[in-house]
């Protein structure tokens, strides 16, 4: 019935500022821009990001009852977490600490202009092998 996540919708207080932030810092491409919304894409099989300007922006994070750690609802994938963490910090993005487990897997949190907690991880889950294959083809 349902096959995959098509789009992740994010409420924003200032559409132009958010388009600039997501395209500059996360290297997304704006593929559609309306008066109060915009569709952004990585141009691969991942979901698109739909920014919707609204008067009220609510947080999209939650606290894990077991660990007390704040989690985002969106994890972006990065092959090289240390590089992604360093690049976002060098661009002035508020980031959390880089957390790596044994084996080098982990992630870190960062914030968009509206204070939404987002995350980056280097973990691919079952069925996401195409993302690794896309990267390999791009490097060739």
Image: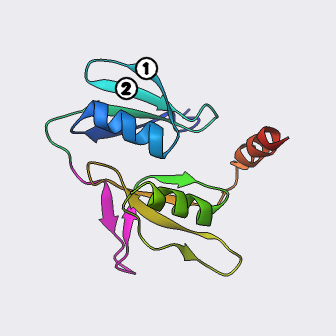
Residues at discs 2 and 1 in contact (Cβ within 8 Å)? yes
Please determine whether, in this image, residue 28 is positioned above or below residue 127: above
**Residue 98 point in image, percent of width and height:** 51, 72
Describe the element under mark 2 as helix, strand or loop. Answer: strand
**Label disc, if present, on residue 32 of the rendered structure:** 1
62 relative position to 46: left or right: left
Q: How is the image coloured?
A: rainbow
134 relative position to 74: left or right: right
**Residue 9 point in image, percent of width and height:** 37, 37
**Residue 136 point in image, percent of width and height:** 81, 45
Residue at the outermost front position: 90
Describe the element under mark 1 as helix, strand or loop. Answer: strand
125 relative position to 75: left or right: right
Q: Which SS type dominates the magenta stretch?
A: loop
**Label disc, if present, on residue 38 of the rendered structure:** 2
**Residue 129 point in image, percent of width and height:** 74, 48
| 14 falls in the magenta region | no
Residue at the outermost right position: 140
What residue is at 40 percent from the left and 55 percent from the top? Answer: 73
Residue 66 figure quarter = bottom left
């Amino acid at each position: 019935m349902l096959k995959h996540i098509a789009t992740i919708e994010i409420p924003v207080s200032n559409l132009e500022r958010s388009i600039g932030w997501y395209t500059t810092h996360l290297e997304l491409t704006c593929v559609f821009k309306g008066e109060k919304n915009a569709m952004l894409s990585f141009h691969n099989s991942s979901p698109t990001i739909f920014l919707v300007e609204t008067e009220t922006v609510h947080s999209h994070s939650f606290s894990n009852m077991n660990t007390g750690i704040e989690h985002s609802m969106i994890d972006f994938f990065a092959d090289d977490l240390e590089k992604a963490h360093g690049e976002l910090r060098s661009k002035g993005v508020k980031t959390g600490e880089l957390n790596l487990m044994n084996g080098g897997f982990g992630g870190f949190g960062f914030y968009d202009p509206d204070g939404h907690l987002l995350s980056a991880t280097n973990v691919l889950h079952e069925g996401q092998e195409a993302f690794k294959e896309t990267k390999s083809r791009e490097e060739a």
